[in-house]
Amino acid sequence: MRIVVIGSGVAGAAAAYELARSGADTVLVDSAAEGRATSAGAGIICPWTSRVRDPAWYLLASAGAEHYPALLAALSEDGEEDIGYRRVGALRLLDPGDREGAESVRSLVATRASVSALAGDVSLLTGDEAARLFPPLRHEGPVLRVEGGARLDGRLLRDALRRAAVRRGARTVRGTARIEARDGRVRGVSVGDELVAADGVVAAAGAWSPALLGPLGVHVEVTPQRGQIVHLRLPDADAGTGAGVGTGTDGGAGADTARWPVVLPRSSHYLLAFDGSRVVVGATREEGSGFDHRVTAGGLAEVLGEALAVAPGLAAATHVETRVGFRPMGPDVRPLLGTVPACEGLVVANGLGSSGLTMGPYVGALAARLALGTPPELDLTPYDPLRRAAAVEGP
């Protein structure tokens, strides 16, 4: 059985990996378009603190987080050890003037965490206690800490999934794909002059999916949302370990950032840290951007302004780069995942929005199982890829 996966972002790469592990003849097609969301994504894995109240979204997001240990173990077996994943904890900043509200949030998050194998302890910290974990932070109010919050590097994860899929026998093809269908079912995929015959197709082309599926008469409500994400580097520390701050060789504040927690301010922005004194802050959510792959002055001002408002200790950091990605936004907060009745053999995996690195690997695995004809382990009705906007509550 041959399955073609179109799109090698995290969902597509995960689908290809799952298919190859299952023994399917797998072909992964990617156009390498600028602005793929996975390449820019920050990679925060902490659905328990989310402000989204939609049960169907939360079911998939929490399952996505719980999927990571098994995925990491499988990748390790296939020689992929480093995707930048680490459970560093997460700090959600709460309203300084609303102690009752803080307790309500703590109770909700604790209830969610109680049925998770990964979430760990949930506790309220003072601003000073939080700053000992993320030294640039300054917050006067309570801070909710979730022990099991994690972060990862989206590029490393995507590349690891692709390499592991190839080791398992998958073939990669570079170019723009066109799905070939006849008599109500897919027949293959054309890439340039090559026609790849296929028994099934997983369409995981992110924000570019409408152009891919439109010629088949399949219309999905997916639009690009530009996100600008800033990478900073603190001066190297010459003293101290762990979360401590030392004095850099240039007189600045150096830090070993490897175990700093994710920080979730009261806005939609975030801060997280990686090895090598690197701190990532983001991100804009720009509707109507189209595929304009530019770093803008306004975007930089927004991201840096939001970051420095909660973490003024980052003011002396060096700007390393700004990444731009296009989130595939569906008609509501839920992903688009499922088969297309009018086109047998076609599976859509899309619309993950800002949750791509939380649920993308799991969504990709589910899409692979659908392509293989394996019954899904959960009801996918709420994620119907052809639906119009549902009445759900977003962030």
Image: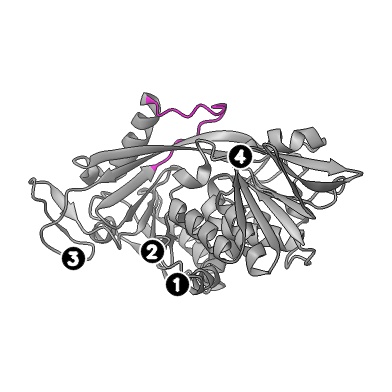
Residue 212 percent coordinates (x, y): 70, 37
Judge the density around disc 3: few (<14), some (14-19), many (≥20) Cα neighbours within 10 Å: some
Specify the label residue 120 is tagged with: 1
Residue range corresponding to the magenta coloring? 282-296
Specify the label residue 89 is tagged with: 2
The residue at the far front in this view is 193
Give the Cα separation between the discs numbered 2 and 4: 39 Å
Whether tag 3 and tag 1 are in contact, CB under 8 A, the answer is: no
Whether tag 1 and tag 2 are in contact, CB under 8 A, the answer is: yes
Answer with mark 1 or mark 4, whichever residue precedes in sequence. 1
Quarter of the image with the N terminus is bottom right
Answer with mark 3 or mark 1, whichever residue precedes in sequence. 1
Amino acid on which disc 2 is placed:
Gly
Specify the label residue 241 is tagged with: 3
Between 395 and 292, the one nearer to me in the picture: 292
Specify the label residue 175 is tagged with: 4
Q: Determine the secondary structure under disc 1.
A: loop
Give the Cα separation between the discs numbered 1 and 4: 43 Å
Amino acid on which disc 4 is placed:
Gly
Amino acid on which disc 3 is placed:
Thr
